[in-house]
Amino acid sequence: MRLLLAAIALIASPAHAARPLITDDARVVDPGSCQIETFYKRQREFRESEFGVVPACNPWGRVELALGSIWVDSTQPGDSRTLSLQAKTLLVPLETNGAGFALTLGVAQVSAFQSPSVWNPYVNGIGSFSFLDDRVVLHANLGALRDNQLHLTRGTWGIGAEVLLVAPRLYGILETYGQRLEKPTLHGGVRLWVVPNRVQVDATVGNQHATPSDRRFATVGLRLLW
C-alpha cells in the first residue's frame, strides 16, 4: 500500500512540471514543440529505486499533452508500475512580473505488487507568479485525485519556488507538496541548462516523514526539448 500511495503521489499530485519540480507550473511547451523528461530516484533509508519517462507535446498552441510512466523497484513490499495520461491548458499565460494560471486533467493507472490495476482520475489547478524580472517564480497547486483503490477522493496540493542563482543557466528549486492521508514532502535542488532551452540536467534531495521511518531520497534528471 505504501508503494501504491507513493506512485499515485508522484503522478497525480502535481504532474509533469518542469524538472526537477513536482509542483506544476503555468507553462506549456512552445506551440509545435515537444520535450521528454527522465529521472532516476533512489531511497536512502531502504532499497528502492524509481525510473520515470514523461514525453509531452503541444500540437495546438495552448494545450500540452503528456504521457508518463514510472517504474518502482522496492523491497517494501514489492514493485509497482504507473502510467499517466494528461492534458494541461493555459488559462492565463505567465508573463514577466505577472501571474499565470493553468488547469490539468488526467488519469493514472497504477499496477502494484499483488494488487489489481486501478485507474485514478485527477484534476489540478495551477497558479504561477513572477517576481524580480523572472529571477524568482513561485508556483501553487490545488487539486483532487479519485483513489479507486481505497474508494475515496484525496485533496492534493503543492507550493514551489524557482530562483535564478547564476544567470542565465543555473536555478535553485525548493518545494513542499502532499495529499490527504500523507505527510508533506520537502524537496530541493538545482537545474542547469547545458544547452539553453534545449538540454537541461538536474539533481535534488528530499524527505517525507512517514511510518515506520522517514523516506529520504535523491534524484537526478535529464530534460530534452525540440
Image: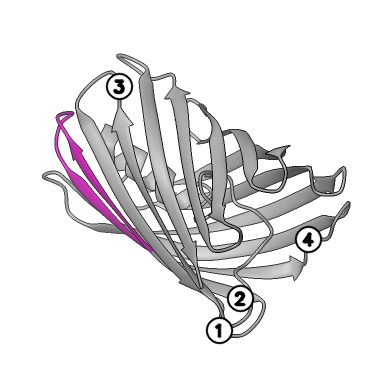
- Going by the numbered disc 3, the residue's amino acid type is Arg
226 or 115, nearer to the observer: 226
The mark total stands at: 4
Residue visible at 17% across and 54% down? 116
CA gap between label 4 and label 3 equals: 37 Å
Mark whose residue sits in front, 2 or 3: 3
Give x and y (percent) for residue 62.
67, 76
* Disc 2 residue crowd, few under 14, some 14–19, many 20+, Cα 10 Å: many
| Real-space CA distance between mark 2 and mark 4, rounded to the nearest whole angstrom | 14 Å
- Cα–Cα gap, marks 2 and 3: 37 Å
Element under label 4? loop
Which callout, 2 or 4, points at the residue further toward the start of the chain?
2
**Residue on which the image places disc 2:** 63
Q: What stretch is highlighted in magenta?
A: 68-85
Q: Name the residue under label 1.
A: 59
Residue at numbered disc 3: 44
Q: Which of 33 and 142 is in front in this view?
A: 33
Residue at (39% x, 40% y) in the render: 220
Name the residue rendered at 82%, 48% in the picture: 130
113 w.r.t. 60: above or below: above
Vertical placement of residue 152 versus 119, above or below: above
Taking the spot 61% from the left edge, 76% from the top edge, the residue there is: 63
Q: SS for tag 1?
A: loop
| Mark toward the viewer: 1 or 2 | 1
